[in-house]
Amino acid sequence: MVSLQEITEQALNEERYLLYIYTPFCGTCSVARTMLEKIESVHKETIFYEMNASYFPEFMYDNKIESVPCLLIKEENQIKEKIYAFRSIGNIYSYLIQYKPELFGNN
């Protein structure tokens, strides 16, 4: 099964990524993670990086992450979106269509 990939320092320097930020004991984070895992399972590939916010306080501060769960979308070396309300798988897909169109054959 495909699973979210833990972010690395090298990956943080990539110009484009989808980053799921969580803390281990957050119930809402667990629900959000399940949604992201289902999306990856359907596409049979790793789409999202994940970051335990507890280990990256400087990143949290520098990027003004207000709460968890958070889906941070970086595009062209700029943070484009910070999604805090995951709501549904359909809602997450609305962002994927915009920021990761290659998943849908829209290159």
Image (cartoon, helix red, strand yellow):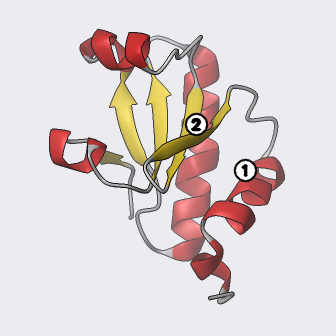
Q: Nearer the viewer, residue 27 or 79?
A: 79
Q: Secondary structure at mark 1?
A: helix
At 26% across and 46% down in the image, what residue appears?
A: 13
Q: Which residue bears the numbered disc 2?
A: 71
Contact flag, marks 2 and 1 (Cβ < 8 Å): yes
Q: Three-letter amino acid code at disc 2?
A: Leu
How far across and down, in percent of the image, does residue 24 sit?
Answer: 40, 17
Q: CA distance from mark 2 to mark 1?
A: 9 Å
Quadrant of the drawing holding the C terminus: bottom right
Q: Of the residues under marks 2 and 1, which one precedes in the sequence?
A: 2
Quarter residue 16 falls in: bottom left
Look at label 1 and name its amino acid: Ile
Q: Give x and y (percent) for residue 23.
A: 43, 16
Q: Is residue 68 left or right of residue 98?
A: left
Residue 73, percent from left and from top: 56, 45
Q: Nearer the viewer, residue 99 or 88?
A: 99
Q: Is residue 24 above or below residue 43?
A: above
Please give the residue where the numbered disc 1 appears in the rendered image: 92
The answer to whether residue 24 is seen in the rendering is no
Q: Position of residue 36 (x, y in %)?
A: 58, 49
Is 104 on the left-hand or right-hand side of 33? right
Q: Residue at x 72, y 54 (%)?
A: 95
Which label belongs to residue 101? none
**Label 1: few (<14), some or many (≥20) within 10 Å?**
some
Residue 22 falls left or right of residue 8: right
Question: How many circles with numbers are drawn on the protein?
Answer: 2
**Pointer 2 local density, CA inside 10 Å: few below 14, some 14–19, many at least 20:** many
Which residue is depicted at the point 67% across and 82% down?
Answer: 104
Residue at the spot x=48%, y=57% of the render? 76
Q: Quadrant of the N terminus?
A: bottom left
Classify mark 2: helix, strand or loop.
Answer: strand
56 left or right, relative to 101: left
